[in-house]
Amino acid sequence: MPTLLETAYKAVDDKKAQEIVVLNMEGVSLIADQFIICHANSERQVQAIAREVSDKASENGFGIKRVEGLDTGRWVLVDLGDVVVHVFHKDERGYYNLEKLWGDAPLLKMADEQ
C-alpha cells in the first residue's frame, strides 16, 4: 500500500501539476513532515489537482484535515496531517515562493522522478 506522501505525489503528478517539489519538513516545522508544492496554469486545473489529492487520499484510507482556497483556485492548501499539499496558480507561486521561505528544508526525491 502506498504511503500518504506517495499517494499525494502521484495525485498531483497524475493531474499534470507543474514543477512538483517535495520538501522534508521534519525538524524544520511542526506543521507537517512533508510539503508538496506545485502549480498549474489555470484556476480550474488548480482545483482539479486539489480535488484529486483529496479523492486519492480518501480512497487510500487517509484522513483530510482541511482544504483551503478551493473556491478561488489561486492557492489551494490540502492538509493531510503529516503531508501538506500546496497547489498554486502559476502566477501566485513565485509571489509566495514557499521554497525560499522554507529554504532550510531539504528537497526529497520521489522514486518516479526523472
Image (tube, rainbow, N blue to C red):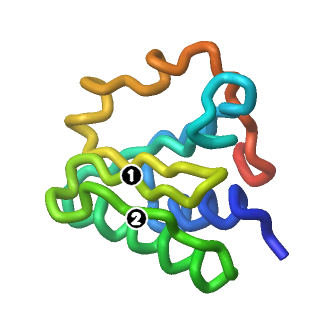
CA neighbours of label 2 inside 10 A, class few (<14), some (14 to 19), many (20+)? many
Q: Secondary structure at mark 2?
A: helix
Residue 49: mark in rendering: 2
Classify residue 41 as left or right of residue 2. left
Residue 93: mark in rendering: none
Instruction: Indicate the amino acid at tag 2.
Output: Ile
Report the quarter where the N terminus lies: bottom right
**Could you tell me if the residues under marks 1 and 2 are in contact, i.e. CB atoms within 8 Å?**
no
Q: Secondary structure at mark 1?
A: strand
- Residue at image position (74%, 46%) is 110
* Most foreground residue, 101 or 12: 101
Q: Quadrant of residue 90?
A: top left
Instruction: Where is residue 10? Give x, y as percent.
Output: 63, 64
- Residue at image position (43%, 27%) is 98
- Closer to the observer: label 1 or label 2? 1
Q: Farthest residue in the right direction?
A: 1
- Residue at image position (70%, 63%) is 4
- Residue at image position (32%, 51%) is 40
Instruction: Where is residue 96? Give x, y as percent.
Output: 30, 26
Q: Quadrant of residue 24?
A: top right
CA neighbours of label 1 inside 10 A, class few (<14), some (14 to 19), many (20+)? many
Instruction: Where is residue 15? Give x, y as percent.
Output: 45, 66
Classify residue 86 as left or right of residue 63. left
Residue linked to disc 1: 77
